[in-house]
Amino acid sequence: MSKLRMALIFGGVSNEYETSLLAAASIIDNIDTEEYETICIGITKKGRWLYYPGTSEDIRNDTWYENPDCTSVVISPDPNRKGIIKIEDGEVSVHRVDVIFPVLYGKNGEDGTIAGFLRTTGIPYVGSDLMASAACMDKTYTRMVLGYNGFKTSNWRMMSRNDLPDLDEKCNEYCDELEFPIIVKPANFGSSAGISMAHDFESLKYAVKMALTQDEKVVVEEFVEGEELQVAVIGYDNINVSAPGEVRIEREGTDFNSDSEKAEYIVPADLPDYTAAQISETAADVYRLMGCSGMARIDFYRNYEGEIIISQINPVPEISPDSMFVKLMEAEGYTFTELISLLLIQAIDDYDGKSVC
């Protein structure tokens, strides 16, 4: 029996380019090579798509694109030619692909951009569709959908670049309506990139202006003190949900983007059984509500009053042996290798019989 051929897409024009490289290298190092043949497609920071035939080590250290055997590549948009098209020395060749695993984080990937394109190819792929990806990526849409359906999020407001002429007025409103400290984050950036904490009016203005350099709109929300909890979910119609894990992060001051941050993962989290079950059940409900498929990591806060508050939904969670998503699924009995295989097989099984359009 021939191996299934998996196309791994990594890199991308995104502030989370390095996270993607780590995920790709980790998958290459841990995939079941008896069952799968891996074809690597790297996207440079300038957006060039390259077939990459080298090692995971060169992906990890970001020298992959220097490989002399890299060639231009595209994924065929014709569902009758399911595969990749390599362009080398003026010659064009088509290579079959059975399933695609995109590990593109942030903009131009996690936001649904790649999902919308892959849907037209007729090739199964791991992950959510365009609509679910976009809604989860945009923190304002996520909060609106969750709030409308009765799920608790932090107390929040939204501001766009069009509101900048009224910055003082808007920030005065936020000071009246929200309690300090206040977190400001770009609506469509990565999990922690561009996030600031404000303790007064002036620092709030500065945080908003900085966040609006990264995105057209920002989320302004109250800081929730308490435990940071995360749940892994995988699957399509039938889903597997992990028990919650806890993230303990040491930060220097109010900097959410410091290289000195140290995270400790406690898996499973030290919670009463009832609370853990409630959080996992909520994660499953949120996954279905947002239309997620393939995989996601749902993040929560548990404040000092015991309230469960939804923080964010990551439709493309970080994937590496040391990531919380992998650790949570390992606690459910899946090795990293088994998890990769399960994600690929579920994507193929789910796609069977579905229309390309």
Image: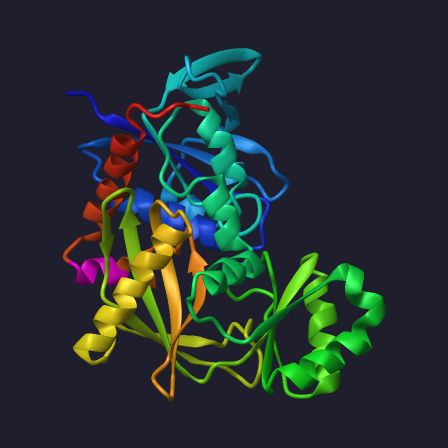
Which is the main secondary structure of the residues drawn in magenta?
helix
In front here: 24 or 347? 347
Task: Identify the image quadrant of the N terminus.
Answer: top left
Residue 292 in the image, given as x and y percentages of width and height: 38, 48
**Is residue 304 shown in magenta?**
no
- Relative side of 328 to 188, left or right: left
Residue 341 in the image, given as x and y percentages of width and height: 23, 41
Q: Residue at x 20, y 80 (%)?
A: 272
Instruction: Determine which quarter of the picture holds residue 247.
Output: bottom left
Q: How many marks?
A: 0
Q: Residue at x 46, y 49 (%)?
A: 20
**Is residue 329 shown in magenta?**
yes
In front here: 275 or 234? 275
Q: Residue at x 43, y 66 (%)?
A: 150
Q: Residue at x 53, y 61 (%)?
A: 144
Q: Is residue 57 visible?
A: yes
Q: Which residues are magenta?
A: 327-332
Residue 30 drawn above or below residue 230: above
Residue 125 in the image, given as x and y percentages of width and height: 37, 34
Residue 101 in the image, given as x and y percentages of width and height: 37, 38
